[in-house]
Amino acid sequence: MATTKWIIDPTHSEVSFKVKHLVISTVTGYFRKFEGSLESASENFDGATVKFTADIDSIDTNQTDRDNHLKSADFFDAANHPKLSFEGKLSEEDGDYKLIGNLTMRETTKEVTLSVDLGGVTDDPYGQTKAGFEIEGKVNRKEFGLSWSAVTEAGSVVVSDQVKLHLSVQLIKQTEPVSAD
């Protein structure tokens, strides 16, 4: 059975995360370098396989010292674990999509479930077929070995354990079908 391959268009995609700081505000960060693909045998993407990686050194929270701390051994340990990865399957039921798969950070792999909103499929002015997805979920950073923690004198947690993920992804349909073995 032939499948269709789609790849992430990085110029029209965004990978972000949000984490509470001092319990009172939220810090937003981005992975600026990433790649991924989706392979599907169905027009509605049900059962599609998804692969994704992000470069840890591309973390950007708009604050260099914080970015360097996130890249350090206290968090992602980019020197020893330069990428995070995800492999999973997209499933559709009555128009609702879920992405279930294995997220790996710092050589720790956990199954996660992400909610997915299919924005649609259309052709761009250059004849390329594009598909848009909004993907959201939550993970506990400590489950992946990102365990640095501190408490203020008043007892507030500096960085929350819970991290919200948000990916706004546009995919480009590849013209050559892929043969499934």
Image (spheres, rainbow, N blue to C red):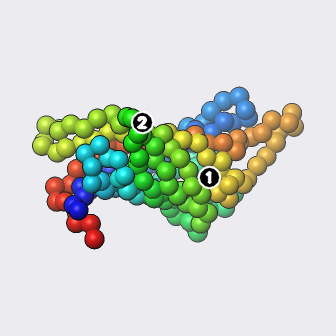
Residue 56 relative to residue 129: left or right:
right
Q: Position of residue 110 (x, y in %)?
A: 59, 57
Q: Residue at x 22, y 50 (%)?
A: 173
Q: Secondary structure at mark 2?
A: strand
Contact between labelled residues 1 and 2, with CB atoms less than 8 Å apart: no
Relative to 148, residue 116 above or below: above
Q: Residue furthest front?
A: 94
Mark 2 residue type: Asp
Q: Is residue 18 left or right of residue 54?
A: right
Task: Please identify the quadrant where the C terminus is shown.
Answer: bottom left
Q: Residues within 10 Å of mark 1 (few under 14, many from 20)?
A: many
Q: Position of residue 42 (x, y in %)?
A: 27, 49
Name the disc covering residue 96, or none.
2
Query: In the orientation shown, which residue stands out farthest toward the bottom?
Result: 181
Relative side of 52 to 40, left or right: right
Nearest to the observer: residue 162 or residue 92: 92
| Count of marks overlaid on the render | 2
Q: Nearer the viewer, mark 2 or mark 1?
A: 2
Q: Which residue is mark 1?
A: 70
Instruction: Say if 28 sits above or below 79 in the image.
Output: above
Relative to the observer, which residue lies in front, 163 or 50? 50
Q: Residue at x 16, y 60 (%)?
A: 176
Alpha carbon separation for disc pair 2 and 1: 34 Å
Mark number, residue 121:
none
- Measured as percent of width and height from the top left, residue 150 is found at 79, 46
Dot 1 amino acid type:
Leu
Is residue 29 in view from this perspective? no
For residue 29, which quarter of the picture? Answer: top right
Q: Quadrant of the N terminus?
A: bottom left
